[in-house]
């Protein structure tokens, strides 16, 4: 019952921008969109998050559509080290709790080639 | 800061054996989580804790027990290991409840049950 939909895989040439799409059509008004990545079975690593405005940090940019039903993670100059599984996540409330947790679907396998 | 650490990194068990996985964090986080990840899958939540002395079930708790006797440690126990518990186990922690919920992950424990 993932709340997000992502392509299974994508590839990108080194040095080019990688644009990873995500659909989250059932997102609630106060839920953030998070992006994490997982490199070669390491622990997931936080990339960026946003609510409704576009966000940018040293790793990536996040573009969220005005209706908040989809977003795109942009790696502006992909390197070989960016090859990883990228997870687009919205917070899911744990049953009977106000505690939210991040629901990890299968993500997008991004392969950056030389 | 070491962040989130997990011990051991690898373990092989025989069916029916027991073991405990240790997660430690030095960030003074209140909330801690145990996930498992099977090949080609996202992470699934086993148990979580909202503070010292408290634990709760996630989405796949059967066959596991947890304890949070100290704020910085979260232990995951397998009383009688089964081959279906072969997986990579990740621990995570986060500071605050709320809409912004960056989780910090450990490096994982790779467990094989024969």
Image (tube, coloured by chain):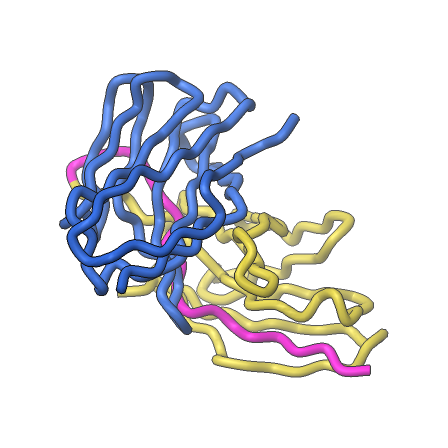
Chain colours: A yellow, B blue
Give the residue at x 45% y 27%: B96
B99 relative position to B61: left or right: right
Q: Position of residue B38 (x, y in %)?
A: 36, 65
Q: Quadrant of the C terminus of chain B?
A: bottom left
Above or below: residue A82 compared with residue A58: below
- Pinpoint residue B88: horizontal percent, then vertical percent: 40, 57
Q: Is residue B66 above or below residue B9?
A: above
Nearest to the observer: residue A112 or residue B69: B69
Q: Decide if residue A61 is on the left or right side of residue B45.
A: right
Q: How many marks?
A: 0
Q: Residue B53 or A18: which is nearer the viewer?
A: B53
**Res. A27 in view:** no
Q: Position of residue A73 (x, y in %)?
A: 63, 64
Q: Is residue A71 visible?
A: yes
Residue drawn at x 71%, y 73% is A18
Front-most of A7 and B63?
Answer: B63
Quadrant occupied by the N terminus of chain B: top right
| Residue B39 falls within the magenta-colored stretch | no
The residue located at (35%, 43%) in the rendering is B34
Identify the residue shown where x is 45% and y is 65%: A69
Is residue B108 left or right of A25 when viewed as pictured? right
Question: In the image, which residues are magenta?
Answer: A96-114
Does the segment drawn in magenta span residue A111?
yes
In-image side of B111 versus B16 (left or right): right
In the image, B36 versus A109, the foreground residue is: B36
B74 lies above or below A38:
above
Residue B13 locus on image (x, y percent): 30, 54
Q: Is residue B107 above or below residue A7?
A: above
């Amino acid at each position: 019952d993932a709340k997000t939909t992502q392509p299974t895989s994508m590839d990108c040439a080194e040095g080019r921008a990688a644009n990873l799409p995500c659909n989250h059509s059932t997102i609630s008004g106060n839920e953030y969109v998070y992006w994490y990545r997982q490199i070669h079975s390491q622990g997931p690593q936080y990339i960026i998050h946003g609510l409704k405005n576009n966000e940018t940090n040293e790793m990536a940019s996040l573009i969220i559509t005005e209706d908040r039903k989809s977003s795109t993670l942009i790696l502006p100059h992909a390197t070989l080290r960016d090859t990883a599984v990228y997870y687009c996540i919205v917070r899911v409330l744990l049953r009977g709790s106000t505690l939210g947790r991040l629901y990890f679907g299968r993500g997008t396998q991004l392969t950056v080639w030389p | 800061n070491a962040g989130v650490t997990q011990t051991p990194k690898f373990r092989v068990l025989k069916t029916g054996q027991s073991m405990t996985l240790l997660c430690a964090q030095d960030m003074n986080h209140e909330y801690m989580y145990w996930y498992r990840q099977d090949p080609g899958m996202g992470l699934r939540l086993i148990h979580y804790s909202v503070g010292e002395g408290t634990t709760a079930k996630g989405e796949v708790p059967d066959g596991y027990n947890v304890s949070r006797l100290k704020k910085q440690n979260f232990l995951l126990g397998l009383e009688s290991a089964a081959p279906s518990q072969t997986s990579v186990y990740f621990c995570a922690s986060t500071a605050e409840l709320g809409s912004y919920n960056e989780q910090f992950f450990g490096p994982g424990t790779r467990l094989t049950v024969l």
